[in-house]
Image: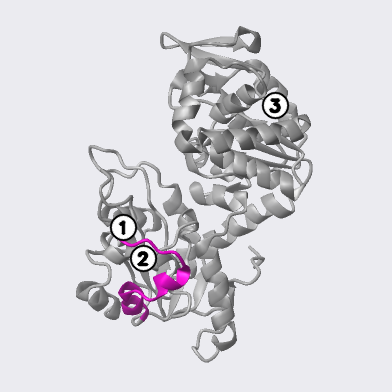
Amino acid sequence: MGHDVEGVLSLDDVDLRGRTVLYRIDVNSPLEPASGRILDDGRFRAIVPTLQRLSGSRVVLLSHQSRPGKSDFTDTRAHSRLLEDITGRQIKFVEDVCGEEAISAIQSMEEGEVIFLDNVRSNEEEYGNKYHSNEETESTDLVSILSSVSDAYVTDAFAAAHRRSPTLTGFTKSLPCIAGTLMESEIESLRTALRDPPRPYLAILGGAKCDDSMRVARNLIQRGNVDRIAFVGVVGNLMLWVSGKDIGERNQEFIRKTLGEDFVPTWDMAEKLYSENQEIFFLPQDLAVEVDGERKPMSLEGLPTENPIYDVGIETLRNLRPIVQESGCVLWNGPASYFELPEFAFGTIEILNMCVETEAMTIIGGGHTSALVNSRGASDEVTHNSTGGGSTMSFLSGDSMPVIGSLKESYSVFRENLEDLGLAV
């Protein structure tokens, strides 16, 4: 991959052989409640290229799993074992983040060795504090201790790039901060989706996070390079409601409840976007509802309904297909249906099939959609399958990203003196 991410250090800019590298990844994953088994290894496979590039370094892995107080908040022992299985390399788990045990483990590493520190969120500074700027994360003990025993910091934690904490944004000025292979490809692909997509450009926005989808739609429209936006899933139901269709009290209530206090601003944004851009919007033309556990087709004329709308219908998919086929670029974020229920997975799987079959550049926007692509073995058949969830949506909404801000600032601090540090290529 070419080095296209301007203003950020990449692995092509540095020679890290024989160096101690802090490598921040995001392998936060869904766990099976009973056994603690990791259910999706997509984020682990995504960091393999960077690990291969660092095979001559001493690599210290930093990651989090969930957060304190949640049932899936665990140590990262299973994560280190899974990564060992995937890479075929020995990875030592260290039950510490920045105490004596961690420091002595780092200092006694050999070239080519990899260690995996414990869940960074078990450290109070990493998760107990609220940070209002990247600078605040830089002056933590966690950062000063770990940077004192390291030569460089590499990050592939794109899935957490919209957050700030010591292990994400704290090393900006104490170590050269470098984008890993995954971070680079995430930034490049999502920048293409925002700035310079092959036309015609179709965005398919679904799922239940209506507020996120509206912000993405607004940003794409403001940038002026999106040709069609198709709304499916709960977002599609909201847009039908905004367009004047009565989707029934139960479905309205679900949207109100999901959005909570964000309902009114989201509704206002949706209404404004619809009144100004409806000619480029593609809304569901028929639906599938659940009646006594069964899938039942429903035309829009059949609305309002007291049954939950769980999928788009056949007609909608039939009319969406040519739009996908004729596109130069397709961005898809969010399922079209309640796809965890087998009889309602149809719409979502059909859209995935369309994305796989089209000649267009296809960018899958993370979260549930990405997990579905992985679970169906289709990640090699799309152009880019994002490892982010909230971070992908933040990026596409045009929000500022603390981790990318940290990489850019570190570039301006260190690019001139890589030579002095002995890290220049």
How far apart are labels 1 and 2 at the CA level? 9 Å
Quadrant showing the C terminus? bottom right
Residue appearing at x 44%, y 80% in the figure: 174
The amino acid type, in three-letter code, at marker 2 is: Leu
The amino acid type, in three-letter code, at marker 3 is: Leu
Front position among marks 3 and 2: 3
Sequence-first tag of 3 and 2: 2
How far apart are labels 3 and 2 at the CA level? 43 Å
Residue appearing at x 29%, y 39% in the figure: 32
Q: Observer-nearest residue: 306 or 50?
A: 306
Give the x, y percent position of residue 153.
44, 73
Q: Is residue 260 above or below residue 17?
A: above
How is this picture coloured? one colour
Left or right of 297, for residue 362: right
Badge 3: how crowded within 10 Å, few (<14), some, or many (20+)? some
Whether tag 1 and tag 2 are in contact, CB under 8 A, the answer is yes
- The mark found on residue 80 in the picture is 1
> Overall secondary structure of the magenta stretch?
helix
Give the x, y percent position of residue 132.
44, 64
Where does label 2 land, which residue? 61
The amino acid type, in three-letter code, at marker 1 is: Ser
Where does label 3 land, which residue? 320
Front position among marks 1 and 3: 3
Residue range of the region highlighted in magenta in the rendering: 128-147
Query: Which type of secondary structure does the marked residue at label 1 adopt?
Result: helix
Give the x, y percent position of residue 178.
52, 72
